[in-house]
Amino acid sequence: MGAEAGRLCQVFEAVVARVTPPPRATLRERVTWVEALIGADPTLEGESLLDDETSLRVVARAAESAATDTGDIAARDIAALRAFKDILRGLVLADAVLGAGEDMPLSYEQFVFELVQAVENATCTVPVEGEAVLVASALEVRGLAFEAVALLGLAEGDFPQAEREDTLLRDADRAWLAEQGFAIEPSLQGDEATFFYQAVTRARRRLLLCRPYLADDGQPWEASPYWFAAQGLLGGAPLIHVRPTDPVSESASAQELIAAAPDDGLDVPAAVLRTRVGAGPSPWNGDLSALADELGRRYGADQPWSSSRLETYARCPFYFWAAYVLELEPREAPQAGFDVLTLGSIYHAVLERLYKRVPDGDPDRLRAGLPAVAREIYAAAPQDYGFRPTALWQHQQAELTEVLRRTLEGLIEAAGEYVPLAQELPFGLGDRPPLILQAAGGPGLRLRGYIDRVDRAPDGRLRIIDYKAGSTLISASDLAEGHRLQLPLYALAAQEALAAEVAGGFYWHITSARPSSLKLEGCDGGAAGAIETAVGHALAIAAAVRAGQFAPHPPAEGCPAACPATAFCERYAPRLR
């Protein structure tokens, strides 16, 4: 009996040692200890490698019982154990995402407290028989666990969605009301991070994260910050680039093949449409070469041009024909308040007046002067820009000022060694000479306009900034295709007017408070190369106008509603919003 008692004592001491929590451990180490004690789930890929001889094999024993159990008790137990493991791993993931101190020791009492709270807030659903796919929002799957989860739309502005303040009651007003004792919360809750955490912790075996890399207009679409965070956490997870032109033969399943099959029948009608659209030149599809003599006189070397007209032709020659040759006006729907063009004019006016009052660009004086300048512009805006203010005008002024405050901070940060030299610098207007572009063997063109802003470095080099109120991204390809000529042409005008070298320049997106990805200094050949490209496009456009070439060419993103030819152009394709 002595030997048997000794053996039993050793076994008992081993069991006690195994179930005794470590005296000092981090959250991750405590979760690992509990998971190892429970044992691996033999039905899950890779978990069997984590099992050891000292575990209680709780999940494995429940699975063995399920093989002989005719009821649903074993299945219920397995579902509960898997849900418990999901809770444990959710604690680790939350700790990693929130950066709450992964290497900090956590007492056993605190660990148990957090675990109990997580268990009380969790739900466990016994899986139904058969295979099915649940399509739901991140909010609807809280507390549920799945074998596999696919999370879609991890792109900037889609997930997370950009939160916006309540238009009627801004957060500053809400904070003041809260200080007065009213039970009111801010409108910006930061719920998107919570939704993402809820979604990615629902997967038990496989997690698929998807994001679009191109927007509807073909421009690159930036990834969500959650995409990069997930890549950092998951390490070497495979990244697959899927394209819509991938052949049907690469379908991943019979269902995908069946879904793609109907598209094969579109080839014939699409070919017919391409043939009709690609018919030879004629007066009915924009070939007005019969009017070349008249157009040559009208748009001769003395005719002043603007960069916006050149860009209009580059995007769609028929738009240019309707708007500037026929001088048709678009049918605009009446609206209350100001439109997008007026908004841009207000932004430009505030920035122009502010920098004229602070010509040295001192950051503190710019910040201090912004509110007063903005109020002056707002007070005169309805009369200056011809709109009737709505009941929201006061709230809109506060929103506009906040946008201008952010963009001013961005401009101050981007200033570097440059200081403001000129605001709204004219050329080709009044007594200012135009920019003349000479063409080899033909008439050139005269360009006029206003340069939003010219900055100068200590060594005399210039930088051109053109403000843009719209949200459309501007890239180097826009210059290469002739769609964005204003910045380099204005750079050439400033270079000639001020007799100094232009070293760089960019478009400044006011609402997002950042420069465009198109930068003159980043083009092939630097600013000089960008200017050469723009001049080539401008001369080619002027020559095409004089030759009567106005074939419709709808933009890839769709035609703008402001085109005056929308009512009769057979190639009109409305822009999807």
Image (tube, rainbow, N blue to C red):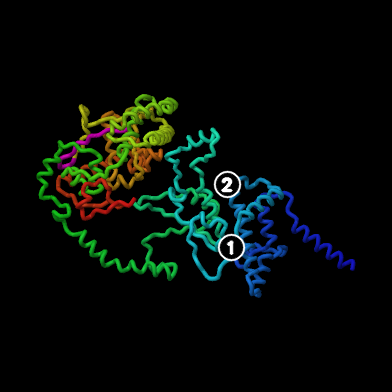
Element under disc 1: loop
Could you tell me which quadrant the N terminus lies in?
A: bottom right
Residue beneath disc 1:
125
**Mark 1 residue type:** Thr
Seen from this angle, which residue lies furthest right?
Answer: 2
Q: In x, y percent, where is residue 62?
A: 66, 68
> Between 167 and 455, which is closer to the camera in this rendering?
167
How many C-alpha atoms fall within 10 Å of the one at disc 1: few (<14), some, or many (≥20)? few
Q: In x, y percent, where is residue 199?
A: 52, 55
Q: Please give the name of the residue rendered at 32% of the width and 41% of the height, measured from the top-left corner.
A: 525
Element under disc 2: helix
Asked whether residue 448 is drawn in magenta, I would say yes
Magenta region: 439-452
Secondary structure that dominates the magenta span: strand
CA gap between label 2 and label 1 equals 28 Å
**Mark 2 residue type:** Leu
Using the image, determine if residue 536 lies above or below residue 385: below
Residue beneath disc 2:
98
**Picture quadrant where residue 166 is located:** top left
Q: In x, y percent, where is residue 77?
A: 65, 65
Of the residues under marks 2 and 1, which one precedes in the sequence?
2
Asked whether residue 187 is drawn in magenta, I would say no
